[in-house]
Structures are given as C-alpha cells and as structure tokens.
C-alpha cells in the first residue's frame, strides 16, 4: 500500500465510523423519545403501550402522558334549514290564503288574529321576514330549537304549510306601537346598534338587522318586537340555552353583552317600529 493511499483509507474508515455513530445516536434518541418514554408515561396514565406509541408519533390524538379528555357537554342540534331555490321561490310565491287558514286554526291563540301577540312572552309575527318565520318553524320541527308550546304544534305542519303561513304573516301590516312605550335611546345603546363594539367582538346590530343590511337571509326583523321576548331570547343565546343560530353568531355576541345592554337593546327595538337608527336620532333622542 502506498503512502498516499494510507491516509485515504483512514479517512474512509473515520467517515464510516462517524456515520455509524450518528445513525446510532439518532436511532437511540428515537427509541427513547418515541417508544420508551411514551410507554412509561402511558403506563402511569393508564394508556396502553400501542396507544402511547401512536400518540407519540402523531398517528393518534392526545398525549401519551395523560388520558384523552372526554366530552361531557350534551350534544346540541343545529339548524338544518337549507336555502334551496325551491324553498326561496316558494317563500316568494307562498299561498297566503292557505297560510291565513293555517294561522286561524293553529296560530291565532298565541300570536293574535293580526299577528300581534297579546302575551309579552310571545313574539309578534305581523310583518316579520318570511325567511325568518320559516326557519324558526323548521328548527322547531327538527329539534334545533325547543319550546314547550311551539315544538308539538309544528310537528303536524308540512313543508308547504310552513312556507304558506310564513308568507302570510310576512305580508301583514305591522301593528301599532304600544302606547306605554317611551322612545328613549342612550348613546351606548345607539352605538351598539349602529357601530357595535369591536373590542368585545360585537358586530353592529344594524349590520344584519337593519333595513336592506344584506345580512343572512334568515335574519329576523326586530323593529317593534316585544321587549320581553327580545330580552328572553338574548339571555337564552347568552347562556347557550338557545343554540339554533348558524355559526354561533348570536351566542357569541349575546354572551358579551351586559345585562343592562340586553335590556337597552330590547327597549330600543321594541320602540323602533319603522324607524332606522339615524331617523331615530333626528326624531329627538334623549
């Protein structure tokens, strides 16, 4: 062997041994990190060895060092309404005469002959959005929204009947303002209606509920609605008792409102029949 080839052989040997050493260290680290430690941690947490290994390499969810938490919250159904062309066209061309007949047989006892409820806990339906009425009827029927009076009543209604009765009430003129209502709007309530509160993640109410606001198709009309009913629904959304809002829009917003803001917003809309926020200010806000 020549003197020149001897250093080259030694260099090759060192490269081999270095590669073996590095590869061995990597394998040892992988064995410790993905097998030995997870299995030992899993044993202490009551997790079997295979599950602990799968969690360590990311195949199974959870940590090998602790049991996977279980979900104890009850499942809540969500709205199953699908705004298909047939439903939308049906609501635009509803048979109002048929809807009036259904209303006379089923609805007037609570919501009044003209869609104006006598009980403050029941909403006015007169002049309400046909899409909003239909969605709520559909949610009652599917179980996404529950009410001891409405749930059993709606079970007997067909899809066509829900469309017709929604179209009938949407075509009625609104009732007159409660003479007991006094128009009082405080600056913080006006701001919530028109501007919202971005710091708390509260969108302006008018961005969905204002006239021609372009909000979701099922957005209900709030102007002139029962104050007590609005308070009850905002509180139900805030507590999670009512959960048929799509994408949790109302639950997330209502949970950020203070009790006095809920009362103020309900009073604002109850007295705002036919008035938009800007018009309300010009009429003499106090």
Image (spheres, rainbow, N blue to C red):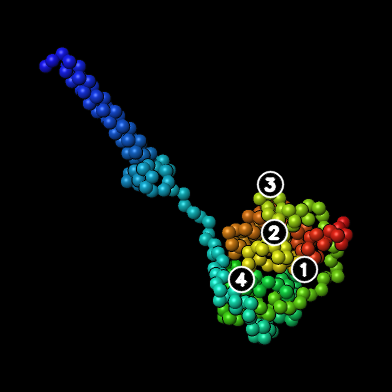
Q: Is residue 109 visible?
A: no
Q: CA distance from mark 4 to mark 1?
A: 20 Å
Residue named by callout 3: 199
Q: CA distance from mark 3 to mark 2?
A: 17 Å
Of callouts 4 and 1, the N-terminal one? 4
Pointer 4: residues within 10 angstroms few (<14), some, or many (20+)?
many
Pointer 3: residues within 10 angstroms few (<14), some, or many (20+)?
few
Q: Residue furthest top?
A: 3
Q: CA distance from mark 4 to mark 3?
A: 31 Å
Q: CA distance from mark 2 to mark 4?
A: 20 Å
- Assign a secondary structure to mark 2: helix
- Do callouts 4 and 1 mark residues in contact (Cβ within 8 Å)? no
Q: Along the line of sight, which residue is nearer the eye, 115 or 174?
A: 174
Above-or-below relation of 84 to 233: below
| Label number found at residue 207 | 2
Residue named by callout 4: 135
Of callouts 3 and 1, the N-terminal one? 3
In percent of the image, x 58 and y 59: which residue is there? 247
Q: Residue furthest left?
A: 1
Q: Position of residue 70 (x, y in %)?
A: 47, 52
Say which quadrant the C terminus sits in.
bottom right
Q: Nearer the viewer, mark 3 or mark 2?
A: 2
């Amino acid at each position: 062997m020549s003197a020149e080839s001897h250093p080259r052989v030694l260099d090759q040997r060192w490269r081999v041994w270095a590669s073996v050493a590095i590869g061995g260290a990597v394998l040892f680290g992988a064995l410790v990190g993905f097998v030995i430690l997870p299995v030992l941690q899993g044993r202490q947490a009551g997790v079997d060895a295979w599950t602990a290994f799968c969690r360590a390499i990311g195949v199974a969810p959870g940590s090998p060092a602790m049991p996977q938490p279980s979900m104890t919250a009850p499942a809540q159904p969500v709205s199953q309404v699908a705004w298909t062309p047939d439903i939308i066209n049906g609501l635009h061309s509803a048979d109002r005469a048929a809807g009036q007949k259904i209303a006379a047989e089923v609805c007037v006892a609570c919501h009044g002959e003209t869609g104006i409820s006598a009980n403050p806990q029941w909403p006015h339906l007169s002049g309400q959005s046909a899409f909003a009425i239909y969605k709520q009827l559909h949610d009652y029927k599917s179980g996404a929204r529950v009410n001891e009076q409405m749930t059993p009543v709606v079970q007997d209604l067909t899809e066509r009947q829900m469309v017709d009765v929604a179209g009938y009430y949407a075509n009625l003129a609104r009732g007159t303002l409660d003479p007991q209502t006094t128009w009082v709007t405080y600056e913080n309530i006006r701001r919530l209606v028109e501007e919202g509160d971005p710091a708390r993640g509260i969108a302006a109410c008018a961005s969905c509920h204002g006239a021609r606001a372009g909000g979701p198709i099922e957005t209900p009309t709030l102007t002139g609605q029962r104050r007590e009913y609005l308070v009850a629904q905002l509180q139900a959304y805030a507590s999670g008792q009512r959960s048929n809002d799509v994408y949790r829009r109302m639950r997330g917003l209502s949970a950020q409102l203070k009790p006095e803001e809920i009362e103020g917003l309900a009073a604002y809309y109850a007295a705002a029949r036919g008035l938009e926020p800007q018009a309300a200010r010009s009429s003499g806000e106090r």
